[in-house]
Amino acid sequence: MGGARGGVSAPGDPEALAAAALRRAPAGIARAISLVEDRRPEARPAVWRLLRRLAAEGRGASCHRVGLTGPPGVGKSTLASAMVGELRRRGRVVGVLAVDPSSPRSGGALLGDRARIALDPGDDAVFVRSMAAGGDLGGLSRAAGSAVEVLSAVHDVVLVETTGVGQSETDVEHVTDTVIVAIQPASGDVLQFLKAGLLEVPDVLVVNKADLGAPAERALAELRSALGTLDAGAGRAGSPPVLATSGATARGVPELVDACDQRFAALVADGSLLARRRRASAAWAYGLLRTLWGERGVERAGGRAALVGRLEAAIDRGAPAVEAVYAEGSRLE
């Protein structure tokens, strides 16, 4: 978040923006994200060029994309701050995308996670961007997928904090490699998550605010019991790790970062990372296309399976997911 390393000659020029972002100039990264948020049709070619260059020259393949979600009030921002601190102690360059509810008046981010995440203002190895959800379902903004691509090109770890979690708010798994779901003690979250099927989403589960003592211990026991029931019913072996954390005291945060690192190392070691990202990007693209053109558009495009297959093929050929969406959409107009 420190001072810019070199200026950006033309804010609307995708080549200049890409070059500045690749230098990790904060102004360049910020303007690159602003470009991918631009919904005007005339901005699309510049968005495609920007994302293609960042994919070709950035560090996206080695960047670990981590999603952090959970119900409002669980302490996601405090936990995110603690995670960033631990990652920086390990020498990682970190990007944070904090997706907030939208202001009904301005349409901007309502809560301003950038202000709520406590960071060292002199540390230029951390970049934080707040983004308004814009009324989109899934707990993320429509542009979040492209913003993650921008941040991934220039950081070792990208942390995506969502607005909250509910039955429809699981899109974070489509833009990240590892999903952390945080649960609050004495809140009934475990039962609600079980009913909504959300305990099948996370790669790591945490009971945050573990400094509350007995209520946190009960929540841990409930969570582990619920996961055991799910595993038995599905005939599967091995639940995601369940950890106790406190964002306020940083208790359990090194272990949480270790669990995320182990998850990413396993994806890389077994060769499944790229395939997972391709499927996830296609799922994200499909959701965006359905938002823009509706179920009737999906039907005209040949149905979900055919559409997802074409989106995956386009992404395999190097098209940014959002470009693949509009290429398909142009056939429907």
Image (cartoon, grey):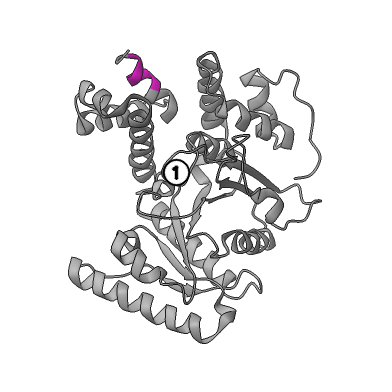
The quadrant of the rendering that contains the N terminus is top right
Look at the picture and state if 183 lies above or below 279.
below
Q: What's the residue at 41%, 45% (across, down)?
A: 138
| Residue type at tag 1 | Val
Query: Magenta region: which residues?
Result: 326-330
Question: Which of the 4 quarters of the picture holds residue 26?
Answer: top right
Q: What's the residue at 68%, 62% (across, down)?
A: 85
- Tell me the SS state at disc 1: loop
Q: Visible in this render: residue 25?
A: no
Q: Is residue 273 left or right of residue 71?
A: left
State yes or no: residue 327 in magenta.
Answer: yes
Q: Position of residue 115 (x, y in %)?
A: 71, 51
Q: Position of residue 326 (x, y in %)?
A: 39, 21
The quadrant of the rendering that contains the C terminus is top left
Q: Is residue 123 left or right of residue 323?
A: right
Q: Nearer the viewer, residue 48 or 287?
A: 287
According to the picture, the residue beneath numbered tag 1 turns out to be: 175
Q: Is residue 81 left or right of residue 255?
A: right
Look at the picture and state if 270 lies above or below 106.
below
State yes or no: residue 258 in magenta.
Answer: no
Q: Position of residue 255 (x, y in %)?
A: 54, 71
Question: Which of the 4 quarters of the picture holds residue 313?
Answer: top left
- Using a 10 Å C-alpha cutoff, classify the residue at mark 1 as few (fewer than 14 neighbours), some (14 to 19) or many (20 or more): many
Look at the picture and state if 41 lies above or below 254.
above
Q: Nearer the viewer, residue 207 or 29?
A: 207
Q: Nearer the viewer, residue 258 or 243?
A: 243
The residue lying furthest to the front in this view is: 105
Main SS type for the magenta part?
helix
Q: What's the residue at 48%, 60% (across, down)?
A: 71
Q: Visible in this render: residue 53?
A: yes
